[in-house]
Amino acid sequence: MIDKLEDVERRFERLTADLSNPDVLADSARLQKVSKERAGLEKLVETFRTYRQVLADLKEVEAWLDAGSADEKTYAREALPGLKEQRDALEASLKVLLLPKDPNDDKNVILEIRAGAGGDEAALFAEEVMQMYLRYADTRGWKSDIIDMSPGNAGGVKDATVTLSGDAVFSSLKYESGVHRVQRVPATETQGRIHTSTITVAVMPEAEEVDVKINEADIDRQAMRSTGSGGQSVNTTDSAVRLTHRPTGIVVKCQQEKSQLKNYNMALRMLRAKIYEIEQERIRSERDSTRRSQVGTGDRSEKIRTYNFPQDRLTDHRIGLTVHNLPAVMMGDIEDIITACRTFYQAEALKAQTGGGPRPQPEA
């Protein structure tokens, strides 16, 4: 591991030197590439340098323990447990940081939320979950845009598409995909019976043009009237756009902008992301089934999480996590949940990489 870390450190130092190179500074594309790569290595290098210093301190303290003065031996006995604990923690961090990086982690996200089983109650919950993610995005300083939304019959949303842009959005949200189940007493339920509804959440990395090439001859384009309440141009102009990609059968729609051209460009972004996700799933399936089970959340039919309002409880069934205070969760306080999912799957990746034991079964 040390040899690999030293190679990374040398690469980091070369990239740092490149940032002072006039040739690099004069080439904006190259400068951006160098800056991005250096930023991606910075945490790993800083952790390695701290780790190396701790090892040096540990070696010195152990030497004092063997052949130091009385004061040095006393200090060594006091310092040794803390240094060993620090060393072990840094080693664990370095192993995680050395895991192969998901190439999509730094990408922006297209988030799709759809009401599933449960009728009107599912649509109401779909809107609440959408607002939960929008509030979380706001706490992270991400930019969010609602691109398309179809209202439910009694409020809420049947389906909604949102773009989230910012720092490492996909890295944070990639484990949110799947079926989210809600259990609660609907406002319309006169006998106080608990109702179970489901929604689906799809988190797709936004693909760049270099990731997916789309032949525009394969796209059927249809302009239509925007639908919804209020707003200039709504229901008065053919600004909404629906695109059908014939080779895959994918259909996307965008109606939020007043300009048909802007809606078309946004619909293309959505289409590109959907095609990219299909291709990534094909690659994952061909690569190995173990990695697909590690991610676990790509299957839209998998129930990943339950929000039980009578018990004020959220349970993530994949990792056996239970938290309380659902009102705070629905207000966007989900960082601890997201961190727990990331930590669980990082541990699974470490086990797979080191040939660890069988995967523990999460809570049913």
Image (cartoon, grey):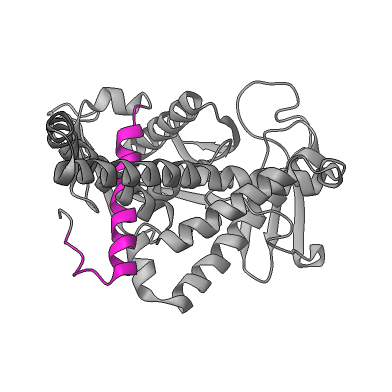
- Identify the residue shown where x is 54% and y is 51%: 9
- 235 or 272, which is in the foreground? 272
Q: Can residue 164 be spotted in the picture? A: yes
- Identify the residue shown where x is 70% and y is 54%: 243
* Segment tinted magenta in the rendering: 333-361
Hey, which quadrant is residue 331 in on the image? top left
- 181 or 197, which is in the foreground? 181
- 210 or 158, which is in the foreground? 210
Q: Could you tell me which quadrant the N terminus lies in? A: bottom left
Hey, which quadrant is residue 71 in on the image? top left
Q: Is residue 153 above or below residue 175?
A: above
Q: Is residue 268 above or below residue 263?
A: below
- Identify the residue shown where x is 47% and y is 70%: 284
- Image-based side of 109 in relation to 313, left or right: right
- 16 or 109, which is in the foreground? 16
Residue 291 x, y percent position in the rendering: 38, 68
